[in-house]
Amino acid sequence: MAMTQDPAPDIAAGEGEACIPFSVAQQVEFCHARGWTDGLPVIPATQELVDDMLEAAGLAGDTVLAEMPSRNVSLTAEKVAINAVMAGCKPEYMPVVAAAVKGLAAPEFGLHHVASGHSGATTIILVNGPIAKKLGINAKNNLFGPGVRANAAIGRALRLVLLNCLRYHPATADAATFGTPGKYTCCIAENEDDHPWEPWHVECGFKPEDSVVTLLAASTMTQIWNFSEHEQLLRCVGDAMSFLGSIAITSQTPGAVIFGGEHAQLLRRSGWNKKQIREFIVAHSGRTVADLKRAGRVDGEITAADETKFHYALDAPEELMLICAGSPIGLLSMVLPGFGGSKAAGRSRPILIQ
């Protein structure tokens, strides 16, 4: 539904075209009035801009990128392109947006749990491979912060798809108690330069020259400050994965750790591989059942056995995603606990960018 002079009812339905007034300011207000924004101004999606988006991705408008039976919606390339334009994407961003939309439909991601829950999880788009550098997607300083168009626009495009096409509106289908600023937009790349290990997509069986998107859901983002040795750092990570108030600790959804530059180099010097790091973190993500009961996270009377019985934040080390990104300077890393809900949900498999 590109915007011309003919009226139309609904961006989610993708039927017809919307009447836009003359001035740019009026066009923006028109979009606000129709509820087509995330609260911020959008770029009115003219047919020319939508066509440019589709052409850059080599997609016909009626190509179905994802079927969403839980929302009774087929996401066509045209609908996605409209929202990409509105989000401020350049045409060359469209292949990444299209891959991210496919990730929403992946059964293992568990979209409805992620998008509708009280925990208000942030959906993070992780980009790997050469396309990240080609598009200028930030993988280094301030990668979760403002200032880089590719990160901001790609992440925002996915959010507008959730709002406009899948109707995950606040206070209706989206029941988040607080939400997070990351629900406006959250797209990052992994820093694959001088990586201590293989990047995420290579670990998952892709070639280094492949470009992929992975979606992951996080209930919060916790920075870890540690200037000691690698074991002390990883103990802090395990503790952050399993704090008593964590939404994720009882349901054990997949989580992630993003190691900043100095911590990544510390781990390189340690000689530990990803398997060792995962096993150590998970082994130090436990809380005694007694502590969980004292905090009201588990019901029942405390027994003597509860004092020595541990419950861990993750079912298995393989559920912990390890990423390298952020500034090369600063003894900081970021822990992303899962969002709660279904154990099976919270991360898509990497999706090849076509």
Image (spheres, helix red, strand yellow):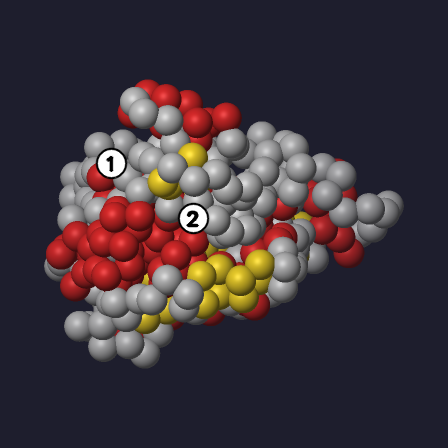
- Name the residue beneath numbered marker 2: 1
Report whether 299 appears left or right of 63: right
Residue 44 in sight here: yes
Residue shown at the point (21%, 64%) measured from the top left: 129
Q: Which residue is mark 1?
A: 142
The answer to whether any part of residue 331 appears in the image is no
Give percent across and percent down for residue 254.
Answer: 52, 59
Specify whether 221 is left or right of 145: right
Give the foreground label among 2 and 1.
Answer: 2
Question: Which residue is rendered at x = 37% and y = 22% of the image?
Answer: 26
Q: In the picture, residue 98 is in which quadrant? A: bottom left
In the rendered image, the vertical position of residue 137 relative to residue 145, given as above or below? below
Q: Quadrant of residue 332?
A: top left
Label 2 residue SS: loop
Above or below — where is 190 with respect to 117? below
Q: Nearer the viewer, residue 37 or 317?
A: 37
| Amino acid of disc 1 | Asn
22 left or right of 37 in image: left
Q: Residue at x 48, y 38 (%)?
A: 7
* The C terminus: image quadrant: bottom left
The outermost residue toward the front is 6
Question: In 3D space, how far apart are the residues under numbered discs 2 and 1 (Cα atoms)?
Answer: 35 Å
